[in-house]
Image (spheres, grey):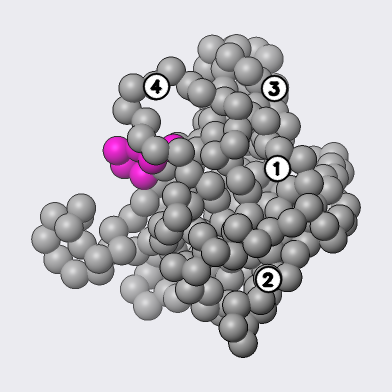
Amino acid sequence: MRRRDRQFHVNEVRRGRDTYRVIHPARPIAHGAMYEAGWGVEMYVNKAATVDFALAWWLAARSPHSLVYLPLRSSACDPEVRYLGRRLDLVFLHHTLKFPTAQWKDVRARLTPTGLQKVELPATPFRTVERAEHERSWRRGFKDHLRYDFAADTLFVVGSRQGYELGSKTFVDLVEQGPAELATAPDAHVCGELDLGVCSGSGPIWKRRDAPLRLHVVACNDHW
């Protein structure tokens, strides 16, 4: 992967005794809308937005004290897909931050276009995860699964550095291989997907606590 960079604002928002550091793009993500869907959430991206997404994922992995916020509801993308629900923003964060998502609406309202910084996505942003490490993540008792929450029209992806690293390949592949696949077959379905959460309890999966949610990032054939 060649190096790519984006500019971000870095804000510190104070809530009572707590201060939250929020990293958010300096420029709007023009084509990266995210929606609720029947099985999870679905995001439609063009080539530039795949980089925005991968860079935010990388930032989240290496920034345990920050919230990485992508304001996707403002995207101009409007795919004609009947099963899509409400639009969503996206926040990545570490579980150790213990951020109360119920406060997000107020924190988001206090963000400002200040604290400009350039962030560069390295040519090799994530370490190689061997198959044995993936297999360990499927065993009972594994603690580093990525989880999720919803608040204020926002999907929160919550986890550890290891969790983000384990889930990185599918989205890095979308950045690296998506352009070539769509150049060869412009109408092909090219995507990256990852299940968030772990089932708890028994009974039908949709009634269980923390039932898995599929994050499905789709290359938009019409606006690639």
Locate residue 177 relative to residue 98 in the image: left or right: right
Q: Which residue, given by chain and number where applicable, does mark 1 sit on?
A: 52
* Residue shown at the point (59%, 83%) measured from the top left: 16
Residue 3 falls in image quadrant: top right
Locate residue 179 relative to residue 192 in the image: left or right: right
Q: Does any portion of residue 16 appear in the rendered image?
A: yes
Q: Main secondary structure of the magenta part?
A: strand
Q: Which residue, given by chain and number where applicable, does mark 4 sit on?
A: 81
Q: CA distance from mark 1 to mark 4?
A: 23 Å
* Residue shown at the point (84%, 60%) measured from the top left: 115
Residue 151 falls in image quadrant: bottom left
Identified by mark 1, the residue type is: Asp
Q: Which region of the structure is painted magenta?
A: 35-40
Locate residue 16 relative to residue 80 in the image: left or right: right
Numbered badge on residue 13 = 2
Q: Position of residue 189 (x, y in %)?
A: 50, 22
Q: Position of residue 44 (x, y in %)?
A: 54, 30
Give the SS element for disc 1: helix
Foreground tag (2 vs 1): 2
Foreground tag (4 vs 2): 2
The answer to whether 9 is drawn above or below residue 201 in the figure is above
Identified by mark 4, the residue type is: Val
Numbered badge on residue 180 = 3
Q: Does any portion of residue 129 appear in the rendered image?
A: no
